Image (cartoon, helix red, strand yellow):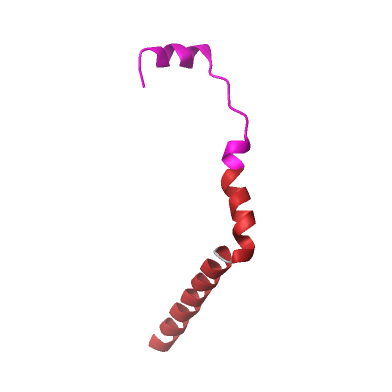
Amino acid sequence: MAIVNGVATLLALATFLGIVWWAWSAGRARANHEASMLPFALPDEPVSDTQRKKNEGNPS
């Protein structure tokens, strides 16, 4: 049973390292940059009157 656990652990480690290698490879740099900019591509949501009044009392 210990051998099965060891093989499963090695398989999981190899899979993890493969995903890390793939994610940080030079070929993914452009896709990673584009994905990191996605939150900024969305338009700003308008602030409601209720939220505006609530924030007036809280200087930030």
Q: Quadrant of residue 28?
A: bottom right
Q: Nearer the viewer, residue 48 or 2?
A: 48
Whole-percent x, y for residue 25 in the image: 58, 66
Q: Quadrant of residue 54?
A: top left
Magenta stretch bounds: 38-60
Residue 37 vertical position relative to residue 54 in the rendered view, above or below: below
Whole-percent x, y for residue 27 in the image: 64, 64
Which quarter of the rendered picture does the N terminus lie within? bottom left
Q: Quadrant of residue 56?
A: top left
The residue drawn where x is 56% and y is 47% is 36
The answer to whether residue 57 is magenta is: yes
Which quarter of the rendered picture does the C terminus lie within? top left
Whole-percent x, y for residue 8 in the image: 47, 79
The residue drawn where x is 60% and y is 65% is 26
Residue 2 vertical position relative to residue 39 in the rendered view, above or below: below
Q: Nearer the viewer, residue 23 or 29?
A: 29
Residue 50 vertical position relative to residue 42 in the rendered view, above or below: above
Q: Nearer the viewer, residue 3 or 42?
A: 42
The answer to whether residue 28 is magenta is: no
The residue drawn where x is 46% and y is 84% is 7
